[in-house]
Image (tube, helix red, strand yellow):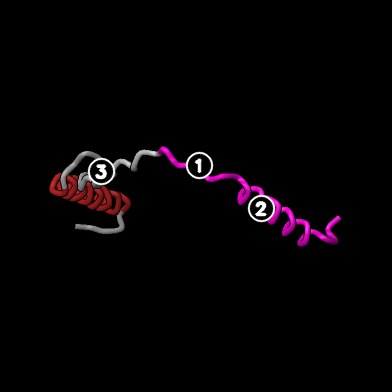
Amino acid sequence: MFDDLRNDAAKQYEDEFEEEAQQPVAKSSFAPAAPRRARSPKLLGMTSLQRFVLLFLLLIATCMLSFFCLFITGKIAL
């Protein structure tokens, strides 16, 4: 079954290549590709300043929550 696998695969590839070479090449009627839009600098519809403010508020909220958790569990004292 696997004795001549490499030669079979090579022969099959060559056969496909010959079939493609024998087919006439038709002129393509494709229109040129539309230019891609430039990437917007906005992530999630926000400007860089809005993202900064949002992340800064998230940082403050995380720090406050962490402080209160440490204070309640008695790991730190005032």
* Residue 65 picture location, percent across and down: 26, 47
Which image quarter is the N terminus in? Answer: bottom right
Q: Nearer the viewer, residue 21 or 3?
A: 21
* Residue 2 picture location, percent across and down: 83, 58
Disc 2: which residue: 18
Residue 46 occupies quadrant: top left
Question: Which amino acid lies under the numbered mark 1 shown in the image of this protein?
Answer: Ala
Sequence-first tag of 2 and 1: 2
Question: Which amino acid lies under the numbered mark 3 shown in the image of this protein?
Answer: Arg
Report the span colored magenta. Answer: 1-29
Q: Which mark is residue 37?
A: 3
Rendered residue at 32%/51% (across/down)? 73
Question: Which amino acid lies under the numbered mark 2 shown in the image of this protein?
Answer: Glu
Give the CA separation, mark 3 to mark 1.
Answer: 31 Å
Give the CA separation, mark 3 to mark 2.
Answer: 40 Å
Rendered residue at 77%/61% (across/down)? 7
Q: Which mark is residue 26?
A: 1
Sort mark 1 into few (<14), some (14-19) or many (20+) by Cα contacts within 10 Å.
few
Q: Is residue 3 magenta?
A: yes
Give the CA separation, mark 2 to mark 1.
Answer: 17 Å
* Disc 3 versus disc 1: nearer the observer: 1
The reply, left or right, for residue 43 in relation to residue 73 is: left
Q: Nearer the viewer, residue 49 or 69?
A: 49
Sequence-first tag of 3 and 1: 1
